[in-house]
Image (cartoon, grey):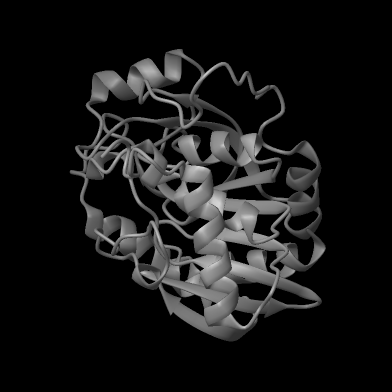
Amino acid sequence: MTDGTSTDQSPYDLAEQAAEKLAELSGVERHDVALVLGSGWLPAAEMLGETVAEIATTDLPGFSAAAVAGHSGRIRSVRVGDLRALVFLSRTHYYEGKGVAAVVHGVRTAARAGCRTIVLTNGCGGLKESWTPGTPVLISDHLNLTGRSPIEGANFVDLTDLYSARLRALCREVDPSLDEGVYVQFPGPHYETPAEVRMAGILGGHLVGMSTTLEAIAAREAGLEVLGISLVTNLAAGISSEPLNHEEVLEAGRAAAERMGSLLSQVVPRL
């Protein structure tokens, strides 16, 4: 086994199989937009639109059960206006040790399912004290500190404008108060030390977490337009004197669910 796939099957072929099975189980031949909902975002899913089908991730080739509290191992097909949205209620994290291909399998499946746009969300620590828990922040760029890439071989993918300026502008039309910042992915699963948070700030980061960047890279490789939105669930280590814990992440998401759901329900139909 290599990176979560067998040696005689490429991750792209596996994504194609997952997309075919998805169409069969959901009854929806093609989807338009995909959303990956991170820690704390689950309540917002209910406000998106009409759920046409809900499928266990384990019913599709290449997916495994959710491993993190606050994540649901389900995929929904949702009607949002005239669009068909594919909503992933969980993700595979790099720190689970299943390989990078497993981390981005959902993104590649979405691309094979017809999606042209993907919304990547997460719960994260914020470096700006003005970002109180529950604040949504648009991702303008990222720093990938995992030391890994989902792309193998001499496939040189341009990431200059990875996080779509057009989609960020669209979000600010819906909510002009939205701020933006650079997201920094650490490998996890431990939270960052105060020194690591200071390093992230020195390097130009504003948000710290354990997901998203590898998925964004795979999305760009697949030709998807990417919108990244972080939900600041806590001040990062060293900025706040409070200890960090995952329950805090989930609670901040519950508290911000209405704003997040309202934002997504207005933005997604325009993607």
Is residue 258 in view from this perspective? no
101 relative to 241 in the view: left or right:
right
Can you give x and y, in whole percent of width and height, for residue 43 in the image? 45, 74
Residue at the front extreme of this rendering: 8
Can you give x and y, in whole percent of width and height, for residue 30 in the image? 70, 69
Closer-to-camera residue (257/155): 155
Can you give x and y, in whole percent of width and height, for residue 209 in the image? 37, 39
- Residue 268, located in which quarter of the rendered image? bottom right
**Looking at the figure, which quarter contains the N terminus?**
top left
Q: Residue at x 33, y 24 (%)?
A: 197
Q: Residue at x 69, y 80 (%)?
A: 79
Q: Residue at x 38, y 41 (%)?
A: 8
How many numbered marks have been drawn onto this rendered protein structure?
0
Q: Residue at x 70, y 52 (%)?
A: 117
64 relative to 28 in the view: left or right:
left
Q: Is residue 154 above or below residue 256?
A: above
Can you give x and y, in whole percent of width and height, for residue 189 in the image? 22, 40
Q: Is residue 162 above or below residue 48?
A: above
76 relative to 64 in the view: left or right:
right
**Looking at the figure, which quarter contains the C terminus?**
bottom right
- Residue 160, located in which quarter of the rendered image? top right
Closer-to-camera residue (150/265): 150
Is residue 94 in view from this perspective? yes
